[in-house]
Amino acid sequence: MSATALIASAAGLTAAAGVVELAGVFAASRARRAAARPPTVGAGVVRPGGHATWSVLAAGPAAGAVRALASVGRRIARPAAPADLATRLAAAGRPLGLSVADLMAVKAGGALVALLAGAPLALALPGRLPVVALPALPIAGFWAPDGALARRARRRVGTMETELPDLLDLLRVAVQAGLALDRALAEVADRHQGLLAREWRVAATELALGVPRERALRDLLGRCPAPGMGAVIGALERAERHGAPLAETLAAQAREARANRARRIRDGAAKAAPKIQLAVALLLVPAVLLLVGAALVAGLRG
């Protein structure tokens, strides 16, 4: 009974995390379907009241759940946002068009929902465990969206790091063909369907609309914190400010990005080997031993 209660309490602690994670999956599926369409600048435009437009939350149960959490959170509290929350939100791709105020409302709502959902299970725990579990419920619900944002940002960084070498090669060819930097970014983004290309397309659209180049590139780096992107932005700024040659720099950065990608693949393979050995030791070896034992028993009976 105690083990069952502990498991149920753990499920209550992660309820809010599951809601936000499902919302992230929903947003990722929408982004994949929209990969072939030019993005709309300002999809997460903030209304005068300080909240996002929610236009991307028009459908889907996960989106509705996030919207309900935000609505509840706005009614119970207005917690101050951390200074780096906007940066982390941009690095995660601004899922569901959430603004900083919306995310803080979701966090407050998640804390309340986690407390209400997990309180009966926490109170059923034996001994003094309810004293520990009850305060932990709202804390877990409040911090769960931050964990979901971090996981989403890591996935985006991995995808962007994989796409970066090809985009750099295309950008180098466009620059060598004599295109201006703004036009080269737009052409490369239009000819490559991927997460990083979509972010480049947003930057090219902002430049075409008159956004200052320094701001557009800074925002691009905030949305794309993949390894190597800082060097790329620096090279673009130097080329614009001082007229530094860009093609050779892009070629060198593409080679370095490919080397980093290969190194990451080798590291992942090295980390996978012990896991495979553990699975073999825990699953396959006992199964083989059972088969051998069954054959021996059958032979002895015969």
Image: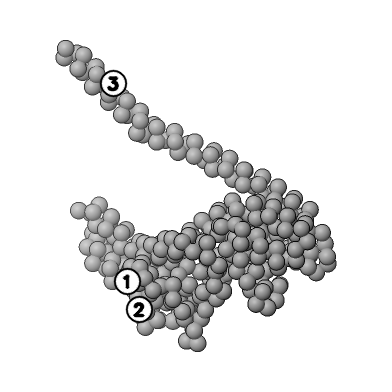
- With 200 as the anchor, is 116 left or right in this view? left
Q: Quadrant of residue 139?
A: bottom left
- With 268 as the anchor, is 116 left or right in this view? left
What percent of the width, then of the height, locates residue 85?
53, 71
Mark 2 or mark 3, earlier in chain = 2
Q: Amino acid at mark 1?
A: Val
Colour setup of the view:
one colour
- With 225 as the anchor, is 283 left or right in this view? left
Tell me whether the residue at label 2 lies in contact with that at label 3, contact meaning CB atoms closer than 8 angstroms: no
Q: Amino acid at mark 2?
A: Val
Q: Amino acid at mark 3?
A: Val
**Who is closer to the viewer here, 210 or 10?**
210
Mark 2 or mark 1, earlier in chain = 2
Of discs 2 and 1, which sits in the foreground?
2
Note whether 37 is above or below 160 in the view shown: below
What percent of the width, then of the height, locates residue 293?
26, 21
Circle on res. 72: 2
> Circle 3 sits on which residue?
292
User: Disc 3 and disc 1: Cα gap in Å?
Assistant: 52 Å
Circle on res. 189: none
